[in-house]
Image: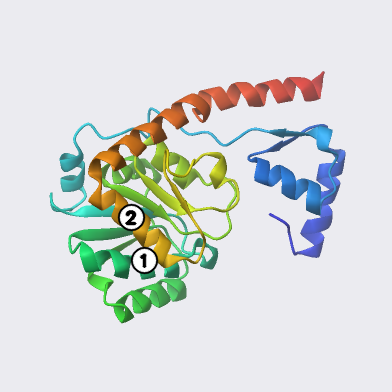
Amino acid sequence: MMSFNWFLRIFEEKMLERSNKIIAVSDFTRRELLQYYKVKEDKIRVIHNGVDVDKFKPATDKLKAKAELGFNPEDKAILSVGRLYARKGLFTLIESMALVTKKFKNAKFVIAGKGLSDEMKKLVSYAAKLGVKDSIVFTGYFPDKKLPRLYQAADIFAFSTFYENLPFAVLEALSTGLPVATTNVGGIPEMVESGRNGFLVQPFNSRELADRILYYLEHPAAASEMGFLARKTILERFDWRLIVKKVVKVYDEALS
């Protein structure tokens, strides 16, 4: 989160200095504030991002959700959501796709998010080079109101970012009850307990990411159980209604 623009950096430092309370959306953010901005620790409150659990919820009829989005019933849809930025690690994700589709020809990867046209061209070209272009759907911009249905149509959520705070995409996937394979970076370990409600992998490691996706495909009962625990985690700790109460409490502290 550290800014490299000197003007913005000065502005951020002044704002943080003058603040009575600072809300960090993860413990990772709290540590960065202490390391890079020298903020007084007693000013910081960690309150995680929240998610609308009524909006992002498991599908009652997954086959129907798949049909609505053009998938065949036998397709195994592996979803990734986020802007097409370099730090999202999408080249690593595409490499993992090449490994997964060798074993599961019915695996379909959906990458939902917009980005620069040059970045999109590079990703499509790399997918073609690895022979998986026909197994990937790049949706481009995807309307927010349709996102819940996209998650419901998916079987697995994969996230290959190498720098992140507490991404909403992972929260939304967990809330939908999807088995998640994501990188062990930033604040992600604060919501994903590897081997329990998802899997954490090292960034840039396409082999490890592919292995976790393959595990889900080869062990559907285990994938279902981890998806159930993912949803349970969100209901207990990341429901936005719980988060709002915590935020209001911090505002009360700041104004008292």
The residue type indicated by label 1 comes to Ser
**Can see residue 52?**
no
Position of 153 with respect to 47 (left or right) is left
- Please give the residue where the numbered disc 2 appears in the rendered image: 213
| Label 1, residues with CA under 10 Å away: few <14, some 14-19, many ≥20 | many
Residues 221 and 157: in front is: 221
The coloring applied to the image is rainbow
For the point 24% across and 66% down, the residue is 101
Amino acid marked by disc 2? Ile
The answer to whether marks 2 and 1 mark residues whose Cβ atoms lie closer than 8 Å is yes
Front in this rendered view, residue 9 or 173: 173
Whether residue 152 is visible? yes
Residue shown at the point (31%, 52%) measured from the top left: 215
Q: Residue at x 28, y 38 (%)?
A: 224
Residue 248 in picture, x, y percent from top left: 66, 22
Position in image of residue 191 (x %, y %)? 52, 39
| Residue at which label 1 appears | 96
Which mark is first along the chain, 1 or 2? Answer: 1
Label 2's element?
Answer: helix
Compared across the picture, whether 69 is left or right of 45 comes to left
- Looking at the rendered structure, the secondary structure element under dot 1 is helix
- Identify the residue at horizontal 49%, vertical 40% (top origin): 193
Horizontal and vertical percent position of residue 73 = 13, 49
In what quadrant of the picture does the C terminus appear?
top right
